[in-house]
Amino acid sequence: MTFGEALGRLFSRRISWLDLRWFSRWLRRQFPSGLFARALLIIILPMLILQTVLLFVFMERHWQMVTQRLSAAVTRDIGAVIELLDSYPDNTEATLLLARQKFGLIASLEKGGELPAIRPKPFFSILDQSLSDELRTQIKRPFWIDTVGDSPLIEIRIQLDDRILRIFARRNQAYASNTHIFLLWMFGTSLVLIVISALFLRGQIRPILALATAAEHFGKGQPMPEQFSPRGADEIRRAGMAFILMRERIERQMEQRTAMLSGVSHDLRTILTRFKLQLAIAGDNPDLEPLHEDVEAMQSMLEGYLAFAKGEAEEEFGTLNLREMLERIREDFELHGKTLNYTLEGEEEVRVRPQAFWRLVGNLATNGRRYAHTVVVEARHSPKWLVMNFNDDGPGIAPESREDVFKPFFRLDEARNQDASGTGLGLAIARDIARSHGGNVTLGDSPLGGLKATIRIPV
C-alpha cells in the first residue's frame, strides 16, 4: 500500500482513534528497523526539511525580488531608448549606438513590421512574469518577449507607431542567474555533512552492535566474541560492563551449582556403592530383589538429575550432520520393531553442541518410539532457524498437561503409560538443552493423531 492510498483510506471516512492507531502502525512499518538507518534519518530529515523551507520560502522570495529589480532596471533602460527615439527621430543611429554602449542593449528598428503571435508562457518562470509586468507598467505599449530556452540573450519586441523596436539583452541583466551557485554550495555542503555524520554515527553504533552480538551469542549458549570489550559512549560502556558482570555472575552460579551437585553425586554414589557391595555379599536372595531394583532406580535417577543440572553447558560448539543423526535414529527404530520416516530441507550441517543436541533429539525420538509405533520427523534448516517436528501416532498428551511434562520429575499417570526405568527428566533435559542453544521445545497435536514435539533453535 502506498502513502497516498494510506492517506486516502484515513480521510475517506470519519477519522477515529482506531484509524489514527492503524495509520501510526502502518507508518512505523514503512520506516527502517535498523538503529543506524533510523539515526541517519533523524539527521537527514530535519536537514531536508530546513533546506526545503529555505528553497521555497527564502530562495523563492530572493529570486523574485532580485529578478523584479533587475527587470525594472532593464525596462527603464528600454523606456529611455524609446524616449530618445521619439524625441530625436533624426538621431536614430546615435540612439541605438548609445543603447549598446551605455545600456548594454542590442537594439534595431524594423519598419512596417508586426509583433509575432504570443508564445505559450512557461509553467514556472519568474523572469517572464516580472519582465512582462514591468513592460506593461512602464512602457505601456504592445510588446512581445522571448525568455524561453537556455540562450544567454532574451529578445524583446515593442510596437512603436510605424516601427518595431527589437532589443536583445543579456539574460543576467534581467534575471538572478547565479542563484544555482548558492544551491550548489548548500546541497554540496549538506551532502558532505551527511557523509561525515554517517561516519561518526557508524562509529557510535558499532559498540551497540557488538554488545547485541555478544548478547545474542550468550542467548544461544555460545562463547563471548574474543574482541568484545565495552567501548563507545558512557551509556554504552555502562551497558557493556553490566552485561559482562551479569554473564560472569550467571556462569559463576552455574559452576557453583555443577560443583555442588558433583560433590553430592560423589557422596551418594559412594553410599550406593556400599549398598551394592552389601547386596552382593548377601548373595542371590529373592527377598532382596526389590532392594536391588530400588538401588538401580536410585542410580538412574541420580545420573539423570546430574545430567539435567549440568545441562551440557561445558561442551563446545561444533558441526553436526543432521542426515547422519536421523539415519542412525531410524536404524535404532528398526531394531526395536518401530518405524521412523524423516525429511530434511536445507543444509545438512548445523553448528550446535553435538553431544547435547544428540541427547535433545534422542530424548524426543525415544519418547516417540516408547509410546507410538510410527514417528515422522520433518527437519527444515533455513539460514536463521533449525526447526524439527516429531509427529507420532501414540496416545498423545492432554493440552492442559503439555507444559507440566517439562517440569523435572513430573510423570503422567494418564495418556502415556509410566515407564519403570524413567525418571521424569527426559523432556526437562530436552527443553533445557534447546534453551541453552537459544531455542525452545513445544508440544502440540500431531496430524498422525498423537503428539507433535517441535524443536526450534536459531543457527
Image (cartoon, rainbow, N blue to C red):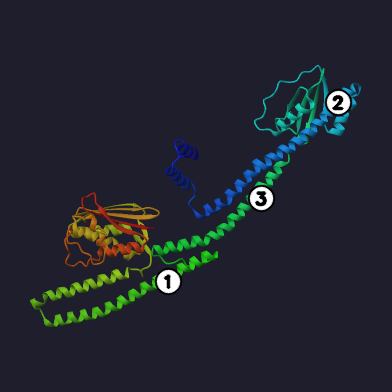
Residue 338 horizontal side relative to residue 227, left or right: left
Residue 181 horizontal side relative to residue 266, left or right: right
Distance, label 1 to label 2, CA atoms, is 96 Å
Lower sequence index among marks 2 and 3: 2
Q: Secondary structure at mark 1?
A: helix
Is there a contact, CB below 8 Å, between mark 3 and mark 1? no
Name the residue rendered at 27%, 79% in the picture.
266
From the image, tell me which residue sits under label 2.
83
Name the residue rendered at 45%, 44% in the picture.
20
Distance, label 3 to label 1, CA atoms, is 48 Å
Is there a contact, CB below 8 Å, between mark 2 and mark 3? no
Q: Is residue 281 above or below residue 115?
A: below
Q: Secondary structure at mark 3?
A: helix
Question: Residue 118 placed where, x, y %?
Answer: 70, 22
Nearer to us in this view, 437 or 48: 48
Residue 415 horizontal side relative to residue 53, left or right: left
Residue 374, by quadrant, is bottom left
Quadrant of the frame with the C terminus = bottom left
Q: Residues within 10 Å of mark 3 (few under 14, many from 20)?
A: few
- Single out the mark in the foreground, 2 or 3: 2
From the image, tell me which residue sits under label 3.
189
Residue 253, by quadrant, is bottom left
Lower sequence index among marks 1 and 2: 2
From the image, tell me which residue sits under label 1.
248
Question: Residue 186 placed where, x, y %?
Answer: 67, 47
